[in-house]
Image (cartoon, rainbow, N blue to C red):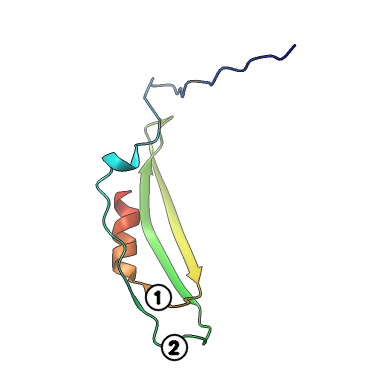
């Protein structure tokens, strides 16, 4: 006899709805790219966003973080300002 598990409702101390926002409802900025000038030559691109903040859905207090990215471009590079705006407004 199998036991059915019901999905748990997202809960927190304030009774906030903490489900993810559907992508269609997000006002996302496009991430721009440009052609990598030296295909076949491996370089690492490091990027850091030090001022990332979010509101904790459980406590309503701000959370602070540093996001560090490192990638090796293949044919295209990510335009870092557009990446920063994308992450800021997601």
Q: Counting residues from the N terminus, which is met first, the one under dot 2 or under dot 1?
A: 2
The answer to which of 1 and 67 lies nearer the viewer is 1
Residue at 48% across, 77% down: 74
Could you say where residue 80 lies in the image, as x and y percent from the top left? Answer: 34, 69
Left or right, 77 with reference to 28? right
- Which quadrant holds residue 29? bottom left
Badge 2 is on which residue? 38
Could you say where residue 8 lies in the image, as x and y percent from the top left? Answer: 53, 21
Could you say where residue 56 lies in the image, as x and y percent from the top left? Answer: 41, 36
**Label 1: how many Cα within 10 Å (few below 14, some 14–19, many 20+):** some
Which image quadrant: the N terminus? Answer: top right
- Position of 60 relative to 66 (above/below): above
SS for tag 2?
Answer: loop
The answer to which of 19 and 32 lies nearer the viewer is 32
- Position of 81 relative to 23 (above/below): below
The answer to which of 89 and 22 lies nearer the viewer is 22
- Which quadrant holds residue 81? bottom left
Residue at 50% across, 82% down: 43
Badge 1 is on which residue? 76
């Amino acid at each position: 006899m199998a036991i059915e598990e019901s999905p748990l409702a997202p809960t927190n101390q304030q009774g906030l709805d903490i489900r993810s926002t559907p992508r269609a409802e997000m006002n996302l900025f496009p991430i721009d790219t440009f052609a990598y000038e030296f295909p076949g030559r491996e370089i690492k691109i490091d990027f850091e966003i030090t001022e990332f903040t979010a509101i904790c859905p459980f406590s309503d207090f701000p959370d602070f973080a540093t996001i560090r990215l490192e990638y090796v471009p293949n044919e295209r590079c990510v335009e870092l300002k557009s990446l920063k705006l994308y992450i800021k407004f997601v």
